[in-house]
Image (cartoon, rainbow, N blue to C red):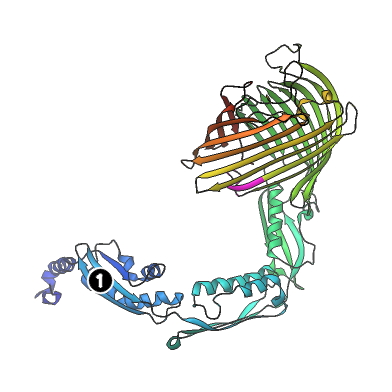
Amino acid sequence: MDFRMLRCARPRPRTLACLALIFIAASVHAEKIRAVVDGVEQPLKAAVLATLEVNQYANRGDVSETQARRLTSDAVAQAKQALQPYGYYNAQVSSKLEHDASGWIARVQVAPGPTTRVAQLDLWVQGDAHDLRPVRQALRTFHPQTGETLDDARYEQSKSRIANALAENGYLDAKATAHRVEVTRADNRADIHLHYLSGPRYRFGAVSFEGSQFRPGFLQRYVPWQQGDWYTQADLLKLQQELTDADYFSLVDVQPDIEDAHDDKVPVKVNLVPAKRHVYTAGVFVGTDTGPGVRGGVQWRWINDRGHKLKTEALLAQRLKNAQVTYEIPRPGPYHRSFNFGVGYRDENTDTSQSRTLSLAANETRDWHGFVRTVGVHFLTGTFAVGGTRGENINDAGIEHGRTTLVYPEVSLAKKVADDPLFVRRGWSINLIARAAPGIDTRFAQLLADAKWIRAFDGRNRLILRGNAGITSVGDFDKLPPELRFFAGGAQSIRGYAYQTIGPRNAFDRVVGGTHLLVGSATLEHYFTPKWGGALFVDSGDAFDGSNFHAHTGVGAGVRWRSPIGLVRVDLGVPVGDSRHSGVQLHIAIGPDL
């Protein structure tokens, strides 16, 4: 219908009727419209489609033929503009409007043509910043280089890397004195001119803390630089992380006060909000090694204005009762030192042993070559019985009784690497312990090593490898309490065997523990959903004396549940080729992988 044929002889009486008639006529061809781009592949096709105005009208049913023709015509210039950031400055673009049963089609045909390439790269930084390693790295990795396609995104990213390298290393007044990209369309040529003037390099000034609950000077120990050192953004982030990890504050805001910088020194302001002083923990748990139980504790994040900490923990389970108090004196600094004093009581009753011991410990922890190193001394005293006490008369034949008092130094090295502490996909841990007692009830020396390696593959699978080893030299083995003897079996040892039921036996054929330990484990997990999975495992090893190693092997399958309280592992295992042990063992464990 030609709209120009519609006439209203008498405008006033027929105004409403004319408007209605015009509206009806205009609506006859009002339909949906969509754009189709041909001639290029992704990502160019997506870039063109994202730029076309016609896409703003997609899925709308109110586009008239006149609008459709305008949108289709405008698409030519819009498509050419969309291709320029990718280096196509001489693209040939045509468009035509089509119609089918679904509505209007704005078809855009693109021939991108040759790319525009960089013929000259005029790039430099004036000033001593040019010799700084991060700046040299940013210059060396600049793109596009000579001969490469001009790409706006890569150009802007490279510019940002140079500017960030300057700002993050103290050149706060650095500026670009030239930043031009000259394009010659006829030759498909681009010349880049990018010059920076670095200006003076700033140093750190005074650090002030607002909102702290500690005495003046305490938090200064967390500052990883000395006043007058070169300003770096990395050191600011390190300070923020150090204060966050100290667990004193709910908010840590570290800000350089650039506006008040003078004499090329930048003061730093740290705003703090104290965290809740007390942390209460409580819960119920179940584990086949300990039986069902409850645990609870109270932690004082700080008990005085020196930042000292106090932590109390108690656990009451079917086969284990444990209570411990730890007092910590942090010594902030580059090595994250702390002095720790603890007292603990342990009452354990397993299939093989019963012990009641009191322990005292004093040690120092610190970072050491990537490990956490702990050096201290332990005092241990108590009574024990070994040889299968649970459910039996404590005086049955073959049950060995003892009382011991030991004082021994201990050194440990621990390291943990994990991409996610709650569910590790790539990670490992290692823990090494050396301890020795010169005498009192008996002399002994002991070395232990525990390692674990986790690697995810094919999206839903994990391979977990674990190893445990230990060796003891002792004067009087009968004086060693159960916690210093080696046993195997259980959810964290050899599955398919009950907890601590593998080890050397006495003349009454009762397990009394050994001086050596060697255990290996492999578990393959497959997750059917993000929360639920299954597992297959094989564990093998022994607790033994001397060279009397005899491998005990357990195999089985299990279920994994990523619950709100942590990873729950439920395994069923059976011994392999062991006439002494038989039947299916249930193993339940809850907690992090590492």
Q: Is residue 88 left or right of residue 555?
A: left
Compared with residue 244, is residue 256 higher up or lower down, i.e. above or below? below
Say whether residue 580 is left or right of residue 407: left
436, above or below 182, in the image: above
Q: Main secondary structure of the magenta part?
A: loop
Query: Vertical placement of 540 versus 530: above or below?
Result: above
Instruction: Identify residue for label 1.
Output: 68
The amino acid pointed to by label 1 is Ala
Residue 270: percent from left, percent from top: 70, 57
Q: Quadrant of residue 280?
A: top right
Magenta segment: does it hold 392?
A: no
Q: Is residue 186 left or right of residue 419?
A: left
Residue 149 position in % (x across, y down) = 49, 77
Q: Say above or below: 80 vs 64.
A: below
Judging depth in this view, the residue of 285 and 548 nearest the camera is: 548
Residue farthest toward the left in the current orientation of the protein:
9
Q: Where residue 14 sits in the image (x, y, percent)?
A: 11, 69
Pick whichever, 533 or 56, lies toward us: 533
Query: Quadrant where the N terminus lies?
Result: bottom left
Q: Residue furthest bottom?
A: 186
* Magenta-drawn segment: 419-428
In the rendered image, is residue 166 in sight? no
Residue 299 pos. (x, y %): 71, 37
